[in-house]
Structure formats: structure tokens, C-alpha cells
Image: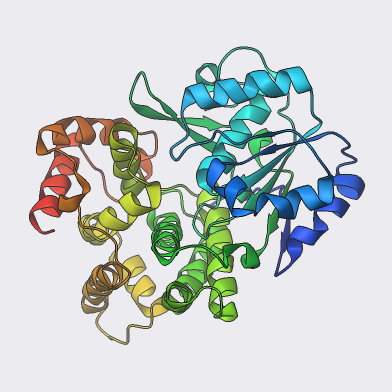
């Protein structure tokens, strides 16, 4: 008999205006009186931080989080919160901010540096509770147990994992997306699609994760173009895309990601390429490689994408063409235009192979396979 497991302790509050529930979550759910805000400089300048501060009053904040957050940044944030001694961390931002906040919450209650906690549940004390408030439509980090942090010395993305790293609450407010530029909606939206596709096709996928992944795929394909076209006015698309991102996070948080993330994280650690952009570039190439290992699954994805083709293989091939066309239409840059040197391909391939999600991929991948994918993506872009 097959045994399925699913775990997600995060309290989820979804909907337009749900940021207004922050007061209730702090006071009634967590009984927190000493919050500390983690964000980034662009969000602070944009005024989105005011949506939090108007409900908490003047609280200390740390806004030094950069894209692909560095271990030194998380260590610095950890030192600050150890001195301030908050009882809850508020995380306002995209995936980089949410991941950094999880790492800082861990360091608030545990000694040492974030690199000491690479791996699974290396902490000895429970991290501070985190209230995650995502401001992009692709991270899923608001409902996962993982923080991905770049170790700049090793030029490697570390995975810090543990069941106590799930945020205590996620306030998922689609209205926070209203002012996002179209390019960011496109890359983060395709990031969410990658989460859903990989959660559905990797080896650890289960009956439970399939439910979330399939609905996420349907929602993202239905709403991403409308959201990119006009995120401010297209409320249904804004909310649909945010729902898809949330459900995809719940899917891969209990399943896993695969080779797309392995290669995207390797590229990001070496070149600081935005994670969503990297996923968007490599998704169709990895899907094509994986097709022989899971043809029925890719045919099912094609039908969720609205492709009406009776033959499963033809449907899957049409899906690949659809994703390539969608990336082009949404303005995702080509691999060749990314500035990545061909001389670094062997290093990227080896790092991808060493990623701890590589064994989960639908089809076994060697470093040589990753190298071939890189060459193919470069030649065809």
C-alpha cells in the first residue's frame, strides 16, 4: 500500500485587502507585541512598507535584502534581531525577502552563522515565528519550509530546511501586485508555473500534491497573460495568478522541484540572474528532456493549459511550443542575451548535478546531461 504524507502548518489568509488582517494575526493568533520587519530598499521606497507600518506603528526594520540573498546579509540581519529581541518577524517582499526572513528568524534563536544550518533541521531551538506577506506572484516561499541562501564564498545556493521554518501565517493580498512592472509579473508568474509543473512531474509527487499542482497549472495558464497585460485593472487575473502561485508553493513544498530549479539556482549563484528569469528560460528544455520519463503527466499538463489534442505525445509537444511562445510573448530574455559565458557551462552543469533536488527530477540527470541542456539552450536562443 502506498503511504502519502502532506504537511502545511501555515495559517493562510488570502484575498484583496487581506493585509488589513495583520493586526488580528499579531494580537489574536500569535499574541506578538514586538515585531521586526524584513524587506528590501525598493519596497521601502515604493511605499508598500507603509501598508505594514500603518498597522504596527514605528517598528525597526532591516531592508538590506538583495535578490538571491547572500549569507552575509542574513548573518547581518541575524545580529540585529539578536540585539533587538523581537517576538515575531514580518517579511514583506518577494522570494528573496521571505527566504532571508526565515534565515534571520532562525538566527534570532540559534547561535552561529546561517551556513551552519545548511541542510535539514540543523537548528536546536525553534526559529521566531514569521508572518510572510508576498509582493510577487511566483515565490511560494510563504507556505514552504525552505530558505535558499547564496553562499558567496562557495558561489553556491544553500538550502536551509526544517518543519519549524514554515511561516506561522501568510497574508496573501493580490492587491499588493498592482504596481509591479510587467516584466516582473512575467518572470515571477512563470516561476510559479515552474513550481507547479515540477511538483507534478518529480518523483516524490503524491496524490495530495497533484491536487494543488494541477489547479495551480490551470490557474496560471488561465491568468498570466491578462495579469501581465494590465495587473492594475485586471483584478480576476491578478487574483487568479496569485492563487496559482500560492497553490504551487503548497505543492512543491510537499513534493519537490527538479532539474529546472537545479540549473536555475546554479546560474543564480554564479551570475546573480533573477531566479524567475532563469526558471523561465530553462523550463521548456528540461520538460523536453523529461518527456520520455513522464509522458502521461506532460499530456495532462497540456490539457490543463487548454491544448485540445487527443494524442498524448502530440499534446505534450504542443505544450512545449506553447511555453516557448508564452515566454517570447511575455518578454523573457534569451539565454544567449543573459551574459553567461560558455566557458562556465561545465561549472554550472556540475553545480546543477550536485543540487539536492536533482535526485527528484522525473528523469535521471548527469552533469553531462546538464551540460547538453545548456548548450542546446544557448544554441537555440
Question: Residue 343's spot in the image, x, y percent?
Answer: 10, 33
Q: Is residue 198 left or right of residue 253?
A: left
> Looking at the image, which is closer to me, 128 or 369?
128
Q: Can you say which quadrant of the picture contains the C terminus? A: bottom left
Question: Residue 186's spot in the image, x, y percent?
Answer: 40, 64
Q: Residue at x 36, y 18 (%)?
A: 153
> Looking at the image, which is closer to me, 60 or 20?
60
Asked if residue 81 can be seen in this view, the reply is yes
The picture quadrant where one finds residue 147 is: top right
Q: Residue furthest front?
A: 45
The picture quadrant where one finds residue 18 is: bottom right
> Looking at the image, which is closer to me, 275 or 358?
275
Q: Residue at x 77, y 47 (%)?
A: 53
Asked if residue 93 can be seen in this view, the reply is no
Q: Is residue 306 left or right of residue 101?
A: left
Q: Residue furthest left?
A: 379
> Looking at the image, which is closer to me, 261 or 173?
173
Identify the colour scheme used. rainbow
Question: Residue 326's spot in the image, x, y percent?
Answer: 30, 72
Marks counted in the figure total: 0
Q: Residue at x 62, y 66 (%)?
A: 174
Does 352 sit above or below residue 26? above
Q: Residue at x 32, y 68 (%)?
A: 298
Question: Residue 98's spot in the image, x, y percent?
Answer: 59, 42
The picture quadrant where one finds residue 300 is: bottom left
Does 82 sit above or below residue 306? above
Amino acid at each position: 500500500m502506498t503511504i502519502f504524507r502532506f504537511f502545511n502548518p501555515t495559517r493562510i489568509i488570502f484575498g484583496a485587502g487581506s493585509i488589513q488582517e495583520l493586526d488580528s494575526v499579531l494580537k489574536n493568533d500569535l499574541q506578538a507585541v514586538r515585531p521586526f520587519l524584513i524587506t528590501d530598499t525598493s519596497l521601502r521606497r515604493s511605499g508598500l512598507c507603509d501598508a505594514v507600518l500603518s498597522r504596527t506603528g514605528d517598528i525597526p526594520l532591516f531592508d538590506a535584502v538583495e535578490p538571491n540573498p547572500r549569507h552575509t546579509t542574513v548573518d547581518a540581519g541575524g545580529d540585529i534581531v539578536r540585539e533587538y529581541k523581537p517576538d515575531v518577524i514580518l517579511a514583506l517582499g518577494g522570494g528573496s525577502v521571505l527566504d532571508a526572513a526565515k534565515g534571520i528568524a532562525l538566527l534570532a534563536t540559534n547561535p552561529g552563522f546561517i551556513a551552519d544550518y545548511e541542510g535539514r533541521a540543523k537548528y536546536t531551538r525553534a526559529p521566531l515565528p514569521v508572518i510572510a506577506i508576498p509582493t510577487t506572484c511566483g515565490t511560494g516561499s510563504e507556505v514552504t519550509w525552505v530558505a535558499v541562501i547564496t553562499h558567496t564564498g562557495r558561489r553556491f545556493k544553500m538550502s536551509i530546511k526544517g518543519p519549524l521554518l514554515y511561516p506561522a501565517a501568510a497574508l496573501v493580498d493580490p492587491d499588493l501586485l498592482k504596481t509591479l512592472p510587467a516584466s516582473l509579473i512575467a518572470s515571477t508568474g512563470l516561476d510559479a508555473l515552474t513550481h507547479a509543473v515540477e511538483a507534478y512531474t518529480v518523483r516524490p509527487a503524491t496524490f495530495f500534491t497533484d491536487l494543488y499542482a494541477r489547479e495551480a497549472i490551470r490557474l496560471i495558464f488561465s491568468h498570466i497573460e491578462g495579469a501581465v497585460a494590465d495587473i492594475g485593472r485586471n483584478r480576476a487575473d491578478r487574483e487568479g495568478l496569485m492563487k496559482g502561485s500560492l497553490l504551487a508553493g503548497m505543492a512543491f513544498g510537499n513534493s519537490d522541484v527538479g532539474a529546472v530549479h537545479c540549473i536555475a539556482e546554479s546560474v543564480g549563484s554564479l551570475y546573480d540572474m533573477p531566479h524567475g528569469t532563469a526558471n523561465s528560460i530553462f523550463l521548456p528544455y528540461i520538460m523536453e528532456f523529461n518527456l520520455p520519463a513522464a509522458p502521461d503527466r506532460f499530456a495532462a499538463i497540456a490539457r490543463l493549459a487548454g491544448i485540445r489534442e487527443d494524442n498524448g505525445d502530440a499534446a505534450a509537444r504542443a505544450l512545449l511550443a506553447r511555453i516557448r511562445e508564452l515566454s517570447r510573448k511575455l518578454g523573457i530574455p534569451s539565454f544567449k542575451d543573459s551574459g553567461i559565458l560558455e566557458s562556465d557551462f561545465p561549472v554550472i552543469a556540475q553545480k546543477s548535478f550536485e543540487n539536492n533536488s536533482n535526485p527528484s527530477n522525473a528523469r535521471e540527470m548527469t552533469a553531462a546531461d546538464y551540460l547538453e541542456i545548456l548548450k542546446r539552450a544557448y544554441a537555440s536562443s
